[in-house]
């Protein structure tokens, strides 16, 4: 029986994807786990794997076209399996709106509207022949195993389960033919499925609150779940009434970067490429250790307290923005952070990042200093609760010991989610960041 290949969600925020390239053509033999197409998501280009052995009978979404997550993009079946093809209706074109003053005209004769496709006709695409074959749905109960009880799972799901020590025998599959796929493993581990199990925080009437965003851990230490106090619930509700969604607040501080610039020059002399942003990333992570109440995320009626300091770096790409994450940045050397940041940014611009490389994170650093911006405010990247926006390092007149002197200064603005982070806490975090950057030798130990 033929099986449809559905477009999977290749990133936490993906809703649709463009087929960049088909790696197989119709008639090619395919093995389970083999990449069959390259898809452009909202974040990067990733490959789609086949879940079954067989032959690629039909490509439903050609290269350059976009499909919705969960929609069929191809059909796989057995060699020699007969496929009936019928003519598909031409793509409908919406009529141009008539001017208000135009005289009414008799309606044009239209072809009768084709009946809605029957279940066996899924996969039909406007502008081309429709594939008429029996299709198994992911939501249908899995047929009895024909492999002697062998667990059917995608290669990625098997690898994730192996790394997590998860027994797949007790996991219910939601993929084609009941196959266990990535989302099933994540749900079983309490990662991606965590948000669905958490009761959503009450939102003001008429204003739906934002859906909780799953916080992936990728096999690392799970965050601690903290209950929300009655006072915190009231604060959260009041702030959401004023600013629906994620209510931001902002605090700004000027930082003397003279010593930080010297550290960078010393690293350069030692042939270690370290940027100002690398110093900021390290300081941002160490400041989280000193102010752990900032290292949190709101999930429904619970606060997640993270135990790792993972810092996202905002990278501008051709058609948007992406935030790859430096994991455990507080524990890494400046040289390691610099190398990782360069490598992640380079692959981000090529859209070659893996989902685990831009998901999660404790806080994000957004730097527009290279564009000559003195200061700006940044929007928080959910499910994070804060972001730091930094401007250019530039010489400015400041008063030191009663004298006006020129110092290399930088402005930093902290944006916080006011539902779980208060202004005083944000200010204390910026104080730590300022102290670390003004005494940067502390970043070396």
Image: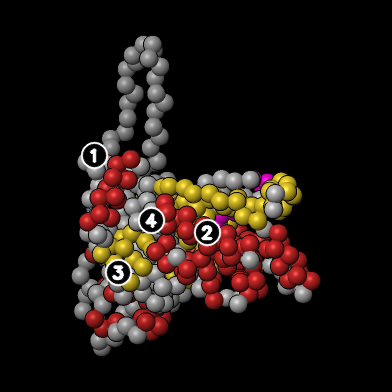
| Residue 393 or residue 170, whichever sits in front | 393
Could you say which disc has been placed on residue 421 in the image?
4
User: In the figure, 417 relative to 162: above or below?
Assistant: above
| Residue 423 or residue 127, whichever sits in front | 423
**Structural distance between the alpha carbons of marks 2 and 4:** 15 Å
Quarter where residue 293 is shown: bottom left
Q: Is residue 409 left or right of residue 235?
A: right
| Residue 250 or residue 210, whichever sits in front | 250
Q: Which residue is mark 1?
A: 206
Question: Which of the marked residues, 1 or 3, is nearer the chain's N terminus?
Answer: 1
Which of discs 3 and 2 lies nearer the camera? The answer is 2
Across and down, in percent, residue 183 comes to: 33, 69
* Residue displayed at 61% across by 63% down: 437
Determine whether the residue tagged by mark 2 lies in a helix, strand or loop. Answer: helix
Other residues around mark 2 within 10 Å, as few (<14) / some (14–19) / many (≥20): some
Across and down, in percent, residue 401 comes to: 69, 53
Q: Which residue is mark 3?
A: 225
Q: Is residue 93 left or right of residue 445?
A: left
Q: Specify the segment rendered in magenta.
A: 365-373
**Structural distance between the alpha carbons of marks 3 and 4:** 16 Å
Q: Quadrant of the C terminus?
A: bottom right
**Structural distance between the alpha carbons of marks 1 and 3:** 29 Å
Which of discs 2 and 1 lies nearer the camera? The answer is 2
In this view, the residue farthest toward the front is 402
Question: Which of the marked residues, 4 or 1, is nearer the chain's N terminus?
Answer: 1
């Amino acid at each position: 029986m033929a099986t449809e290949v559905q477009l999977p969600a290749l990133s936490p925020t993906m809703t649709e994807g463009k087929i960049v390239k088909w790696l197989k053509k119709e008639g090619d033999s395919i093995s389970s786990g083999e990449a069959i197409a390259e898809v452009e998501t909202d974040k990067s280009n990733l490959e789609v794997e086949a879940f079954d052995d067989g032959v690629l009978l039909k490509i439903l979404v050609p290269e350059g076209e976009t499909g919705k997550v969960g929609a069929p993009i191809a059909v796989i079946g057995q060699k020699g399996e007969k496929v009936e093809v019928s003519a598909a209706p031409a793509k409908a074109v919406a009529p141009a709106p008539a001017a208000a003053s135009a005289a009414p005209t008799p309606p044009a004769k239209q072809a009768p509207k084709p009946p809605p496709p029957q279940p066996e006709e899924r996969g039909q695409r406007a502008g081309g022949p429709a594939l008429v074959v029996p299709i198994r749905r992911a939501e249908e109960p899995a047929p009895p195993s024909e492999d002697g009880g062998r667990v059917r799972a995608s290669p990625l799901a098997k690898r994730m389960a192996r790394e997590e020590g998860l027994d797949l025998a007790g996991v219910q599959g939601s993929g084609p033919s009941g196959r266990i796929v990535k989302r099933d493993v994540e749900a079983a581990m309490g990662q991606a499925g965590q948000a669905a199990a958490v009761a959503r925080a009450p939102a003001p009437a008429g204003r739906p609150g934002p859906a909780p965003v799953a916080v992936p851990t990728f096999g690392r230490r799970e965050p601690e779940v903290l209950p929300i106090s009655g006072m915190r619930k009231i604060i959260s509700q009041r702030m959401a009434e004023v600013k629906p969604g994620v209510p931001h607040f902002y605090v700004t501080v000027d930082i003397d970067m003279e010593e930080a610039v010297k550290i960078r020059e010393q690293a350069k002399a030692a042939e270690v490429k370290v940027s100002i942003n690398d110093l900021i990333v390290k300081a941002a992570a160490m400041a989280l250790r000193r102010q752990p109440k900032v290292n949190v995320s709101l999930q429904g009626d619970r606060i997640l307290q993270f135990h790792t300091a993972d810092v996202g770096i905002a990278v501008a790409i051709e058609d948007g923005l992406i935030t790859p994450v430096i994991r455990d940045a507080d524990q890494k050397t400046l040289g390691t952070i610099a190398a990782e940041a360069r490598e992640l940014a380079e692959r981000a611009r090529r859209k070659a990042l893996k989902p685990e490389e831009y998901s999660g994170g404790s806080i994000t650093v957004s730097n527009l200093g290279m564009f000559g911006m003195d200061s700006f405010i940044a929007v928080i990247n959910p499910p994070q609760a804060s972001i730091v926006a930094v401007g250019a390092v530039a010489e400015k007149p400041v008063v030191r010991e009663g004298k006006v002197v020129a110092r290399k200064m930088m402005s930093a603005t902290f944006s916080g989610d006011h539902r779980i982070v208060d202004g005083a806490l944000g200010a204390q975090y910026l104080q730590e960041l300022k102290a670390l950057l003004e005494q940067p030798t502390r970043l070396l130990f």
